Image (spheres, grey):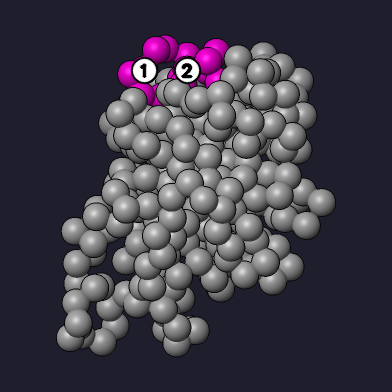
């Protein structure tokens, strides 16, 4: 069994947007308050997160997460990896390096921004990271087998992942027929749907609905929302019955 926790469901700026007084940004509904997009995946023996957002520290605190076995990265945009330094308490508690899984272009960004974590003679208290390179081949983290799903974020390759009957894909505006086949047959899919208006690098709400319908996954959750998506209480009832809007703190299990 897998248990999925939505750590954050907002786009790169988060919701509310700084300085904005729109209905979403001033909403009292906690489902409209969104940290940057990330999830935690737990099996009986393993706990991993996909992406360490700028909100990573708070996401770990508010979900009372005390142990992680690994971090898996989707791509080298800062809203998906900028919180990596806050992995240090997990190093302190376990006395082990954190297992990091990323493709080569994401590793370049991580080693550039967190160069001090990779120095040979570094000071005590800095992040301890053990980097693993991933590409299109399946890989194993303890009892979890992850199948990479490559999508395009305009010109940038982004990795989604399938784990058993669960698939997770964010930050895309194109997916090939071959990669769609990796998702088909899933019981649950989390898919990004930025906003109703067109965007050069993200699926719109209607494009995400069309893709989810084509993939024929029985339960779909949309995520990675801009404040332009609209109010949760207004938008979700208008979606097809098999699609729901993810929100921060949402949790569900997949047998």
The residue depicted at 24 percent of the width and 55 percent of the height is 108
Which is nearer the eye, 118 or 196? 118
> Is 215 situated left or right of 55 in this image?
right
Q: Main secondary structure of the magenta part?
A: loop
> Disc 1 vs disc 2: Cβ atoms closer than 8 Å?
yes
Percent position of residue 162, x then y: 62, 45
Q: Report the number of discs.
A: 2
Percent position of residue 4, x then y: 66, 51
User: Where the N terminus falls, by quadrant?
Assistant: bottom right
Percent position of residue 172, x then y: 44, 29
**Circle 2: element type:** loop
Q: Vertical placement of 71 versus 92: above or below?
A: above
Residue 207 sits inside the magenta stretch: yes
- Residue carrying label 2: 204
The residue depicted at 58 percent of the width and 48 percent of the height is 147
- Residue carrying label 1: 199
- Crowding around mark 1 (Cα neighbors within 10 Å: few <14, some 14 to 19, many 20+) is few
Q: What range is drawn magenta here? A: 194-209
Residue furthest out toward the right: 255
**Measured Cα–Cα span from mark 1 to mark 2:** 7 Å
- Crowding around mark 2 (Cα neighbors within 10 Å: few <14, some 14 to 19, many 20+) is many
The residue depicted at 24 percent of the width and 53 percent of the height is 109
Q: Earlier in the sequence, mark 1 or mark 2?
A: 1
Q: Vertical placement of 132 versus 244: above or below?
A: below
Which is nearer the eye, 110 or 252? 110
Which is nearer the eye, 153 or 193? 153
Dividing the picture into quarters, in which one does residue 139 lie?
bottom right
**Residue 97: in sight, yes or no?**
yes
């Amino acid at each position: 069994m897998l248990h999925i926790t939505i750590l954050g469901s907002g786009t790169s700026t988060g919701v509310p947007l700084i300085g904005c007084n729109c209905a979403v940004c001033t909403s009292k509904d906690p489902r409209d308050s969104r940290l940057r997009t990330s999830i935690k995946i737990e099996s009986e023996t393993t706990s991993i997160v996909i992406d360490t957002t700028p909100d990573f520290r708070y996401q770990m605190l508010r979900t009372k997460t005390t142990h992680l076995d690994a971090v898996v990265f989707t791509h080298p945009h800062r809203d998906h990896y900028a919180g990596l330094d806050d992995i240090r308490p997990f190093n302190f508690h376990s006395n082990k390096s954190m297992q990091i899984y990323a493709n080569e272009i994401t590793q370049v960004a991580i080693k550039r921004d967190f160069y001090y974590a990779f120095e040979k003679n570094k000071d005590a208290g800095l992040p301890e990271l053990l980097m693993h390179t991933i590409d299109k081949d399946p890989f194993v983290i303890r009892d979890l087998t992850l199948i990479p799903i490559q999508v395009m974020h305009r010109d940038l390759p982004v990795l989604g992942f399938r784990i058993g009957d669960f698939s997770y894909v964010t930050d895309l505006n194109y997916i090939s027929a071959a990669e769609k086949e990796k998702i088909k047959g899933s019981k649950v899919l989390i898919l990004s749907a930025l906003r109703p208006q067109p965007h050069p690098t993200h699926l719109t709400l209607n494009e995400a609905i069309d893709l989810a319908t084509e993939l024929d996954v029985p339960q779909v959750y949309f995520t990675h929302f801009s404040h332009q998506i609209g109010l949760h209480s207004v938008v979700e009832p208008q979606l097809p019955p098999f699609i729901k809007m993810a929100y921060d703190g949402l949790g569900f299990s997949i047998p």
